[in-house]
Image (tube, helix red, strand yellow):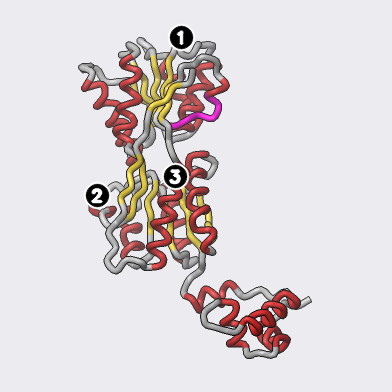
Amino acid sequence: MSKATIKQVAAAAEVSTATVSRVLNESDYVSEEIRERVMAAVNRLNYRPSAIARSLKQDKTFIIGVIIPDISNPYFMGISRGVEDVVGPEGFQLMFCSSDENPEKEKRLLKLLQEKRVDAIVLATSGGNDLMIKQLAESRLPIVLVDRKLDSDEAGRNLDLVAEDNTEGALRLTTRLLQDGHVRIGVVNGPTRSSTGRERYMGVLKAMKEYGLKSEPIVYNGDFSTEDGVRAVRKFICAEKPPTAIISLNNQMSLGVLLEIVRSGLRIPGDMAVASFGEVEAGPLLKESGLYYIDQHPYDMGVKAGEILLRRIRNEEAEPIPAYEIFSNEVNQLS
């Protein structure tokens, strides 16, 4: 059975195609009697307006592209859900893409979303694409950065940003370990091309300096993956002087840290204390682990990003000032 056309709807309702269009788009006044006749015909014929024609006419696709480093990470999905809950009721759909922490893949995805004529982009960048992102923003494509900044302050100056206070959060997390008497600390860090990797490590060093320690921690630079947490623990326990505590600066890496410590037969925190930047879903399964973790708010960050997106898409501000929303986090501990 062929799909109904707008002409068939107009004929069934005994109105013009222009009237059908006005009713469907709510773009002009029509009487209640006419509106009911049109909608009755639409329902009877199961008419569905062409999304392509609608996007061309309104110069909108009603699609927002979302590029995140790891689509399986609950943190980024929490952000995405917050965005969706704000823009969804306004008729927008999200197109999800995972860059896998790969700058080249991210570059291809940015180009793809531009070709798809998305109305805006939410981006947690893997780094290395400042120039392209700057050019897209200058072409008047709204881009809201979440969780991560661009490498260059100059390139990101005119972009909206919703992120966490990474340096301060890592400082607080490290301080708790230092207060417990741990001075030999192993750090599982993310890639330094990422602003979160750089800023969180700066927080660790700042805490140690403020505590009067001159030695630097043992560091494993990973890629924000569970496997990196596993590899880091293997490196640390084989060191000449293994650390008495590990601070993992990403929740996925923290999961790997916990898995490998348990697999190695070590006790948490008796043999090795652990602190995580971000809550680990499996953490509560460990009894009396004393696990420290930063309490993140991904959903709230997504809601804020969604609100900014709608303002940008609607051009509600004559001279928009870039939004700079930084979330502060507290340290919690599992009993």
- Foreground residue among 284 and 29: 29
Question: Does the magenta segment cover residue 281?
Answer: yes
Mark 2 packing: few (<14 Cα in 10 Å), some, or many (20+)?
A: few
Q: Which residue is mark 3?
A: 300
Asked which secondary structure carries label 3, the reply is helix
The residue that appears at 49% across and 16% down in the rendered structure is 289
In this rendering, the answer to whether 37 lies above or below 230 is below
- Amino acid type for the residue under numbered disc 1: Gly
Left or right, 17 with reference to 197: right
Q: Which residue is mark 1?
A: 270
Left or right, 58 with reference to 312: right
* Region rendered in magenta: 276-283
Tell me where residue 268 appears, x and y as whole percent. 48, 14
Tell me where residue 208 appears, x and y as whole percent. 26, 21
Q: Earlier in the sequence, mark 2 or mark 1?
A: 2
Tell me where residue 103 appears, x and y as whole percent. 40, 48
The residue that appears at 44% across and 35% down in the rendered structure is 224
CA–CA distance in space, label 2 to label 3: 25 Å
- Amino acid type for the residue under numbered disc 3: Asp
CA–CA distance in space, label 1 to label 3: 35 Å
The residue that appears at 27% across and 66% down in the rendered structure is 319
Asked which secondary structure carries label 2, the reply is helix
Q: Earlier in the sequence, mark 1 or mark 3?
A: 1
The overriding secondary structure of the stretch rendered in magenta is: loop
Q: Which mark, by number, is residue 153?
A: 2
- Amino acid type for the residue under numbered disc 2: Asp
Q: Which mark lies nearer to you, 2 or 3?
A: 3
CA–CA distance in space, label 2 to label 1: 43 Å
Question: Does the magenta segment cover residue 201?
Answer: no
Q: Are marks 1 and 3 in contact (CB under 8 Å)?
A: no
Q: Earlier in the sequence, mark 2 or mark 3?
A: 2
